[in-house]
Image: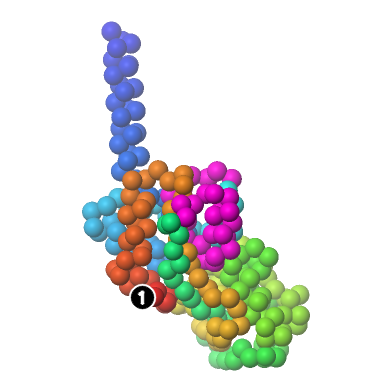
Amino acid sequence: MRLFFFGVFAGLLAGSGTAYAESRGPLVLAAASLQESMNAAADAWAGHHHPRPVLSFAASSALARQIKAGGAADLFVSADEDWMDALAQAGLIVPDTRKSFLFGALVIVGPAGGHLHLRPVPGFPLARALAGGKLAMADPDAVPAGRYGRDALLKMGVWDQVASQVARAENVRAALGLVAHGAAPLGIVYATDAFAEPGVRIVGVFPSGSHAPISYPVARLKAATSPDAEAFRRFLLSAEGKGIFRRYGFVAP
């Protein structure tokens, strides 16, 4: 009899665990620069009586490596096309679900109380503006924001002047934090990051031709298990979804 009740109790636990898994929203791995906007999109989705998506933010490079290593997730939103390409080549995304749906701008930021203005043109005085301090950037060897930043500085012909002063951060938000907290006088981030942090101000905007387009693709992963994964992906691409991202400074065609 005791074994019978134990079996019933175990069955109930298993059933409740299954119900909990089914009630959880899709697990979305998204670039660090999407924190505020993606949370707003998740809130809007939940407002339509869906389970709220579970969001995890980090550098696109770290997230892509996590997926390649077998990490569970339903959707991936990258801050550039290269890391999505890497997952596509590994056969880890559903090809027809890949869509580039957001675009951004690259800027130089300084402390909120400063008065510096820079015009990023060939040979502009970035090294002089640093005055011996650090230039905060996401790691140019791995993270999209850092790669865009290095490409822009190379295009402007000033990379060699400041390369030794670069403070390499694990992602763009970490680079933003270095400037906001006074650890670096200047940093290179996305415009949307600058809008999200009251501790910094934009001191210069890179021309779009100085770097590859800052493009954010989304795709459903082949290992996705959430029944809401595809529906949430479609919501991000909808007029309502794109409207949310526009409010946070993204270009959403």
Q: Is residue 103 visible in the rendered structure shown here?
A: yes
| Most distant residue in the top direction | 1
Q: Quadrant of residue 23?
A: top left
> In the visual, does 4 lie left or right of 251?
left
Q: Secondary structure at mark 1?
A: helix
Q: How many marks?
A: 1
**Residue 43: horizontal and vertical position, in percent?**
31, 60
Amino acid at dot 1 = Arg
**Residue 39: horizontal and vertical position, in percent?**
38, 62
Identify the residue at horizontal 50%, vertical 71% (top origin): 215
**Residue 251: horizontal and vertical position, in percent?**
42, 77
> In the visual, does 250 lie left or right of 228?
right
Quarter that holds the C terminus: bottom left
Quarter that holds the N terminus: top left
**Residue 161: horizontal and vertical position, in percent?**
75, 82
Residue numbers of the magenta segment = 69-95
Verify whether residue 203 appears in magenta: no
Identify the residue at horizontal 37%, vertical 45% (top origin): 226
Identify the residue at horizontal 65%, vertical 63% (top origin): 142
Residue assigned mark 1 = 247
| Most distant residue in the left direction | 49
Q: Quadrant of residue 241?
A: bottom left
| Nearer to the camera, 88 or 50 | 88
Verify whether residue 85 appears in magenta: yes
| Nearer to the camera, 113 or 138 | 138
Q: Is residue 59 above or below residue 228?
A: below
Q: Is residue 221 above or below residue 156?
A: above
